[in-house]
Image (cartoon, grey):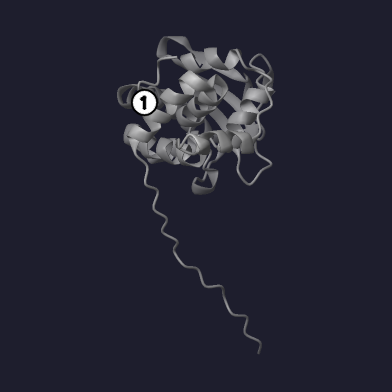
Amino acid sequence: MEIVPSRSYKIDVRPYPINIEDLVRTLSTLKKSHRVYYLLYRIMLEGGLRLSHAMHIIRTFNPEEVVEINGLDIETKRLVCFEERGFCRYYVGVRESVKPCEWAYISKETLEILKQHVGLRISKRPVERYIKRRNLLMPKYIRKIAWRLMIKAMPREVARFIQSRFGELRVSEARYEDLLSEADQHYPRYLEKLRGELGIDRR
């Protein structure tokens, strides 16, 4: 009998020394020196998105388009805003990737900045070079910071849904709709946390 050895996995503990003051300094610097990169960082932070997805949103933003969400009986405009609660959610619908992005939650203030830069094609390397030269917080850390702050403002399952961590969720059709409504309910608390700690509501 042949024996196929199983793989051996080691737990890889990676320290991420993230300081909130570094994030505040990064946002403040970008706000003054590069409005497009400032927008990227706001989108990443407010929605817990990867840099690639934030760039995709700026390039393809189409708020009036009506879409049907695959596998669900939901038809919606890509952009749905909750004016009285100060935020919007945008259907990104990137599913064919190993790194999906279903929804992007953003503040109304970020939406106004986004409208000024729709259609721009941004490349990852120039962003990272610009950030590194100025000793600012690299884009790869923003999603991690967003996660740490989100789970202080909402249930972990809802934070996973907002960040499209579907590999960590079992989402049936009914549960998907539940999580969508729960995300709409809890998200303003996260924005309040950002405003309290970072002053993110100011343009």
Q: Residue at x 51, y 39 (%)?
A: 132
Count neighbours of disc 1 (C-alpha within 10 A) and say few if under 14, some if 14 to 19, many if 20 or more.
some
> Residue 168's x, y, as percent?
49, 48
> Residue 83's x, y, as percent?
46, 10
Amino acid under disc 1: Leu
Q: Residue at x 57, y 75 (%)?
A: 6
Helix, strand or loop at mark 1:
helix
Is 180 displayed left or right of 79 in the figure?
left
Quarter of the picture holding the N terminus: bottom right
- Mark 1 lies on residue: 194
Q: Is residue 48 visible?
A: yes
Is residue 49 or residue 77 the one in the foreground? 49
> Residue 102's x, y, as percent?
59, 33
Q: Residue at x 54, y 19 (%)?
A: 35
Examine the rendered structure and indicate whether residue 17 appears above or below residue 36: below
Examine the rendered structure and indicate whether residue 119 appears above or below residue 12: above
Is 11 displayed left or right of 100 in the figure?
left
Q: Is residue 72 visible?
A: no
Quarter of the picture holding the C terminus: top left
Is 117 displayed left or right of 107 in the figure?
right
Residue farthest toward the top in the current orientation of the protein: 84
Q: Quadrant of residue 66?
A: top right
